[in-house]
Amino acid sequence: MNLNLTGNHLLITSAIRDYVVSKLDRVKRHFDHVIDVTVVMSVEKLRHKIEANLHTRGKDIHVEAVESDMYAAIDALADKLDRQVLRHKEKLAVHRHDGAAIKRDVATAEAHPAGTPTAPAH
């Protein structure tokens, strides 16, 4: 996973970088197919804003959080990103199961052509 960390009106210290990396490890624990993550942190007066773009195979996930403290914003972003990744992972699992059901229905239809009844008629 590639991590690009950018700060607007903010100096990114090693402590903030380590904190962001530790929070983003939660995402890797749930979903292994993360290609890269771009994180933009900005400060405007008392608003600490953090945005993340997570690029996976077939989907880009964008999440942002605004708090009065940067560490609180990072925590909120990690929670939101975790929920989005779990939702995406569940959708992938559902699609895989749907594909198997379609293949099974096609195989059953080929075994029993439309004109032949599968059960005896009364």
Image (tube, helix red, strand yellow):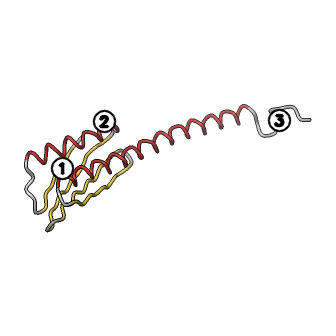
Q: How far apart are the alpha carbons under marks 1 and 2?
A: 19 Å
Amino acid type indicated by mark 3: Pro
CB atoms at circles 3 and 2 under 8 Å apart? Answer: no
Q: Earlier in the sequence, mark 1 or mark 2?
A: 1
Kindly identify the residue that appears in the image at 13 percent across and 46 percent down: 17
Amino acid type indicated by mark 1: Asn
Report which residue position mark 3 lands on: 117
Circle 3 or circle 2, nearest the eye = 2
Quadrant (top left, top right, bottom left, bottom right) of the C terminus: top right
Q: Is residue 38 left or right of residue 9?
A: right
Q: Is residue 97 left or right of residue 62?
A: right
Q: Secondary structure at mark 3?
A: loop
Q: Residue 7, how many percent across, how many down?
A: 13, 57
Report which residue position mark 1 lands on: 4
Q: Quadrant of residue 26?
A: top left
Q: How far apart are the alpha carbons under marks 3 and 1?
A: 61 Å
- Using the image, tell me which numbered label, if any, was put on residue 64: none
CB atoms at circles 1 and 2 under 8 Å apart? Answer: no
Q: Residue 45, how many percent across, how many down?
A: 13, 68
Q: Secondary structure at mark 1?
A: strand
Q: Residue 118, how many percent across, how many down?
A: 80, 33
Kindly identify the residue that appears in the image at 39 percent across and 43 percent down: 86
- The residue sitting at the bottom extreme is 45
Amino acid type indicated by mark 2: Arg
Q: Secondary structure at mark 2?
A: helix
Q: Earlier in the sequence, mark 3 or mark 2?
A: 2
Q: Residue 16, how many percent across, how many down?
A: 12, 48
- Using the image, tell me which numbered label, if any, was put on residue 29: 2
The residue lying toward the viewer, choosing from 50 and 76, is: 76
Quadrant (top left, top right, bottom left, bottom right) of the N terminus: top left
Kindly identify the residue that appears in the image at 25 percent across and 48 percent down: 37
